[in-house]
Amino acid sequence: MTLFLGTFLDTPDDPFAGGALRAEVDGALLVRNGVILERGAAGVLRSSYPEEDVVDLSGGLVLPGFVDTHVHFPQVRMIGALGMPLLEWLQHSALPEEARLADAGYAGEVAAEFLTGLTSAGTTTALVFGSHFPAAVDVLFDQAAAVGVRITSGLVVSDRVLRPDLLTSPQQAYDEGLVLAKRWHGVGRSRYAVIPRFSLSCTEGLLDSCAALLDAVEGAWLTSHVNENLAEVAAVCALFEGCEDYLASYDGHGLVGARSVYAHNVHATPDELDVLAERGAAVSHCPTSNAALGSGLFPLREHVEHGVQVALGSDVGAGTGFSLLKEALQAYYMQQLLGDRGLPLGPAHLLHLATSAGARALGLAEQVGDLSVGKQLDVVRIRPAAGTPLDVGLRHANGPTEALAKVFALGTPADVDGVYIGGEPVVPAR
């Protein structure tokens, strides 16, 4: 067993439902085989377990590992392609880069950069948009397993609209997806996701194929995009006969359920929110992407009032980096800009969105997302370099809530000093 020492902050009780920040200042977690067995004051647990090894994570704040519910593995090299709305950005920036992953060697280089980006930002669990090419998806799963990151990912499929080298057929999508799922689903920390890119690029036949694969792979997940951009919404509604709204293009094929996560949903209708809540589906809010592409301000209040699960996604590469600290801060900004239509957010809300909300959205709340007894020890220590604004702010913070606010306001991946997944270090402390 090992004692982890530090100041631990988490949100086991949902702040959107009245929960509060939990803080264990000068605390300790007793861990065996990566699982938290006991938690309490450092002095008490050190006296109770004097012979156990100690990992000292004091000198900063220890948070649950971040959970990214929407991030594109093939797009790490084109982060920062600014100045374009969604459909133009896809055509000129994202899709040409994604086509390069047909080369498995190139895909391996990108996968290594992608996983380094995730872990160095403190992300320990992610729902990952894979590649249109099976070999590239294999490479991603293989490298993620070696690093230890918890990923849910799969083959991205489309059969219209996109460039020809990214298209497939319904049967090929099913066959290749099934092979990947048999190889990776439920192996170690990996799980399989069925991923129609968006219904704009998927015929009815391909969406039926996705539904068949979802049924064939027990416990598989489904992720895609919805209501990101007004031009995209209009294009989808023009393609699907009798389509009442964007979400209906998926729901008509049985693709909206408790293991579904839809990214963006900036332009949701009340009916769509009702369906998402009734089905138990989740939405990944990607604020830096929404801002960079000019997609709009996310209606968080409406989602919460309808009972829709919401978590955070970085949406690399339309998003501007892997840090969920930045995403949470941008989420805060968006709600401030909405004025009376916004939902005011405090530090506990931001931590919840970046950790326990994501774990719940991915069906992993019994394993990760907070630092309760029985959970896996997935943690990130935030400890800034001496003399930086965040260091000054933490040293003068009036309690844990104010310290956490400063972390979200000022923190970057440079302030990540140690990341553990299942009790094992994946990013060493300085």
Image: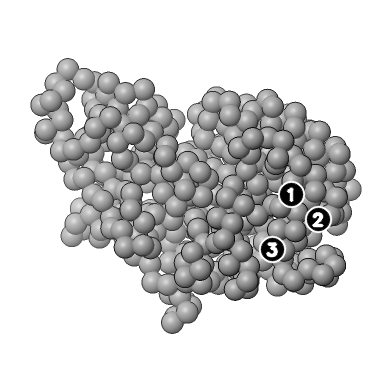
Horizontal arrangement in the rendering, residue 395 relative to residue 293 (left or right): left
Horizontal arrangement in the rendering, residue 341 relative to residue 370 (left or right): right
Residue 95 against residue 287 in the figure, above or below: above
Q: Report the amino acid beneath label 1.
A: Pro
Residue 32 against residue 237 in the figure, above or below: above
Horizontal arrangement in the rendering, residue 274 relative to residue 36 (left or right): right
Q: Residue tagged by mark 3? A: 247
Q: Position of residue 363 (x, y in %)?
A: 51, 43
286 and 59: which is toward the camera: 286
Q: Residue tagged by mark 2? A: 201
Q: Residue at x 51, y 33 (%)?
A: 149
Count of numbered labels shown in the rendering: 3
* The C terminus sits in image quarter: top left
Q: Position of residue 396 (x, y in %)?
A: 19, 57
5 and 96: which is toward the camera: 5
Tell me the tag on residue 196.
1
254 and 419: which is toward the camera: 254
Q: Residue at x 20, y 53 (%)?
A: 395
- Answer whether labels 1 and 2 touch (C-beta < 8 Å): yes
Q: Is residue 425 visible?
A: no
- Marks 3/2: CA–CA distance: 14 Å
Residue 379 appears in which quarter of the rendering? Answer: top left
Q: Is residue 207 visible?
A: yes
